[in-house]
Structure formats: C-alpha cells, structure tokens
Image (spheres, rainbow, N blue to C red):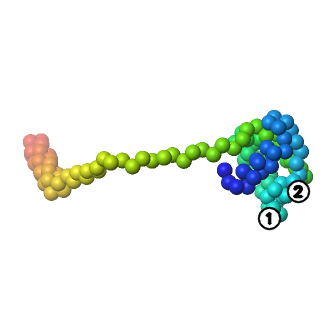
Amino acid sequence: MDTINRNILAKINSSAQKGAYIILSEEDFKETLGTQIDGESISNACKELSNEGYIDLKYAGGGMFCVAPLKDFVAEPEPEFEEDEREVVVVRTGTAAAFFAALLGGALGSIIVSLIISVI
C-alpha cells in the first residue's frame, strides 16, 4: 500500500468508528495529505482501499466521499532469510562425452536406415 492510501485510511480511521459511515470532503483529505493531491487521486485511492477491504465506499462524487472504515492497515512483515551454511556444489557434465554419444547415435541411426532401405 502506498503512502497516499495509508494516509487516507488513517484519516478515515481517525474520523469514524469501525463500520460507521462518515462523509468526508476533498478538503478534509487535503488537510491531511497536503494540497498537492487532487480529487481524482483521492477517489482512486478510496476505490483501491474499498477493493482491498479496508473501507466500505458508499459513494464518491462531487468532492464528497461516504466511507466506513472496516479494518486497520497491518503491514505484512518482511520475510526473514537465514544464512544457510550449506555449500553449493556445481556438477559439470562432460560436454565431450555428450558430443561423441550424439555422434555415435546419429551414425548408428544412419546405418539402420540405410540397411532398411537396401532390403526394401
């Protein structure tokens, strides 16, 4: 969740109880976020929060938003990776052996096909 969505969610959570609808204007959000944000960004953020289940958005239009907070934002903990002390062993197969095996298989296949054609 980006900072705009987090700040909008914080404003909604501080303005109303869980499940209770409240009407907020663009100016209410701009007071919290600063004047650099426009109404369309606020509307998009509210729709994203609604889709993610953080708020219930009844309507958004005319610079007014009817919202109800549903749950708080909980940051998912970063997965911790432990250092593994096992060694990584790289096994290289012999490319020369594979080349000669393929060459021998091609030669045998040619001989078999030649014998079949000569018999027919």
Image position of 90 (left or right of 99): right
Q: Secondary structure at mark 1?
A: loop
Name the residue nearer the viewer: 119 or 63.
63
Q: Earlier in the sequence, mark 2 or mark 1?
A: 2
What's the residue type where badge 2 is placed? Glu
Q: Identify the residue at image location x=86%, y=38%.
A: 21
Q: Does residue 36 lie above or below 101 as drawn?
A: below
Q: How many marks?
A: 2
Q: Which residue is mark 1?
A: 36
Is the residue marked by circle 1 packed among few (<14), some (14-19), or many (20+) residues within 10 Å?
Answer: few
Q: Which of the two residues, 102 or 119, is positioned nearer the viewer here?
A: 102
The residue identified by callout 2 is: 27
- Residue sitting at 30 percent across and 47 percent down? 86
- Residue at screen point 25% across, 50% down: 89
Label 2 secondary element: helix
- Residue 58 visible in the shown view: no
Label 2 crowding class (10 Å Cα cut-off): few <14, some 14-19, many 20+?
A: some
Percent position of residue 22, x then y? 88, 42
Percent across and percent down for residue 63 are 89, 53
Residue drawn where x is 82% and y is 38% of the image: 17
Left or right for 6, reference 99: right
Q: Is residue 111 above or below residue 69?
A: below
Circles 2 and 1: CB atoms closer than 8 Å: no
Residue at mark 2 to residue at mark 1: CA–CA distance:
12 Å
State the residue in front, 49 or 11: 11
| Residue 84 x, y percent position in the rendering | 36, 47
Q: Label 1 sits on what residue type? A: Gln
**Res 26 label:** none
Relative to 18, does residue 30 appear above or below in the rendering? Answer: below
